[in-house]
Image (spheres, coloured by chain):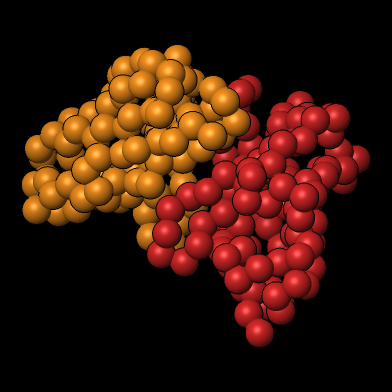
Chain colours: A red, B orange
Amino acid sequence: EVQLVESGGAVVQPGGSLRLSCAASGFSFDDYAMHWVRQAPGKGLEWVSLISWDGGSTYYADSVQGRFTISRDNSKNSLYLQMDSLRADDTALYFCAKEIAAAGLDYWGQGTLVTVSS
Amino acid sequence: EIVMTQSPATLSVSPGESATLSCRAGQSVSTDLAWYQQKPGQAPRLLIYGAFTRATGIPARFRGSGSGTEFTLTISSLQSEDFAVYYCQQYHNWWTFGQGTKVEVK
């Protein structure tokens, strides 16, 4: 059974940093690209970042470019999102998701909540 | 960034009836389009990818169609578990979501 479990969400002050983790199991983690998607309270989905299967390619939404860094450790079946210079509008539930061969996101975690507030 | 626009924002449908949801892309995305269903307190679930291919385990009453800039998700004979928010997403040029359509009980 495929499982994605996010962790690391917290309340952080504006300008602060946070590192999210996503532990994957039940599939060959190093065969698939992985994504982070977020959802602000009561709002829709926003794509955040993508990393290729080997970590060699990364992509970011304009809203987080230069502030967030996606990475992975295939030896640990883990995905990460380093979030720096956090702003109030980064407040959201952050999901990690597995890509189905450049054709959609077929498995999602339950999300971890990041709240940016003073 | 390719802007995805979904309509209507809310669709009121009676159980057993059909629902038609629309998604328009700001520029052609070919068939690089997915549909997701999200229920309150849950993660999104992939329904359709490649504009019309049902994901594993998705019932046949969910049908995707369209290409280029105009796409449709049709849900036939709505069941109680189908009342939810539906999002389209393009992956032709980066990845962007539509703002969602809420399907509610009429």
Viewer-nearest residue: B46 or B80: B46
Quadrant location of the N terminus of chain A?
Answer: top right
Viewer-nearest residue: B52 or B97: B97
| Residue A109 in sight here | no
Residue B3 versus residue A63 in the image, above or below:
above
Quadrant location of the C terminus of chain A?
Answer: bottom right
- In the rendered structure, the answer to whether residue A111 lies left or right of residue B76 reads right
- In the rendered structure, the answer to whether residue B82 lies left or right of residue B46 reads left
Residue A32 lies in what quarter of the image? top right
Residue A10 lies in what quarter of the image? bottom right
* Residue lying furthest right: A75
Residue B51 lies in what quarter of the image? top left
> Where does residue B92 sit, x and y in percent of width and height?
54, 22
Viewer-nearest residue: B11 or B16: B11
Residue B52 versus residue B7 in the image, above or below:
above
- In the rendered structure, the answer to whether residue A29 lies left or right of residue A62 reads right
Residue at 12% of width from left, 46% of height from top?
B13
Residue at 14% of width from left, 54% of height from top?
B105
Residue at 45% of width from left, 15% of height from top?
B30
- In the rendered structure, the answer to whether residue A30 lies left or right of residue A110 reads right
> Where does residue A55 sit, x and y in percent of width and height?
84, 34
> Where does residue A86 sit, x and y in percent of width and height?
71, 66
